[in-house]
Image (cartoon, rainbow, N blue to C red):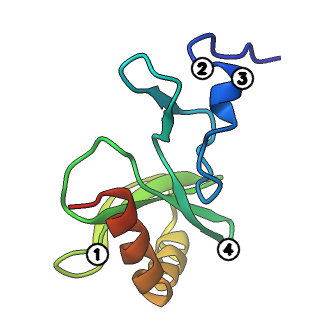
Amino acid sequence: MRKPNPLVAADAQKARPAEHDVGRLFHLVKGTRIIWPMSPTVLREGGFRFYFFSREESRMHVHVHSQNGEAKFWLEPEIELAQNVGLSQREINAALQLIQEHQNDIRSAWNKHFPG
């Protein structure tokens, strides 16, 4: 069984934003009890999890994870595959199609997560 992270108090976990699936990754900000999602999930569909990393490059993109691997897709200037580890061409095509179908929601989530 996984041991709880001693840096994140139990009452701090209650403060986590409900709209994000933050998994097990938290960021303790300047010793306060506020936690921020490190990789918020923006979509789950077709066996894929679509998410962002909080501290990564500023060019708009989304990460995709499935049981077989993961990939990164640029959203600007146009939607295209940036990198892939383990996904088949069929999975890449399926993920790409889902990104295209949900691109407005993904872009909106990006702008909420990375304001300014």
Lateral position of residue 83 relative to residue 45, left or right: left
Q: Nearer the viewer, residue 71 or 110?
A: 110
Residue lying at 42% horizontally and 16% vertically, measured from the top left: 31
Residue type pointed to by label 3: Ala
Q: Nearer the viewer, residue 62 or 14?
A: 14
Residue lying at 63% horizontally and 28% vertically, measured from the top left: 12
**Labelled disc at residue 8:** 2
Residue lying at 56% horizontally and 13% vertically, measured from the top left: 7
Q: Position of residue 108 (x, y in %)?
A: 39, 75
Q: Residues within 10 Å of mark 3 (few under 14, many from 20)?
A: few
**Gap in angstroms between the C-alphas marked 3 and 4:** 33 Å
Query: Which image quarter is the N terminus in?
Result: top right
| Quadrant in which residue 43 is drawn | bottom right
What residue is disc 1 on?
80
- Tell me which label, 1 or 4, sits earlier in the chain: 4
Residue type pointed to by label 2: Val
Residue type pointed to by label 4: Gly
- Tell me which label, 1 or 3, sits earlier in the chain: 3
Residue type pointed to by label 1: Glu
What residue is disc 4 on?
46
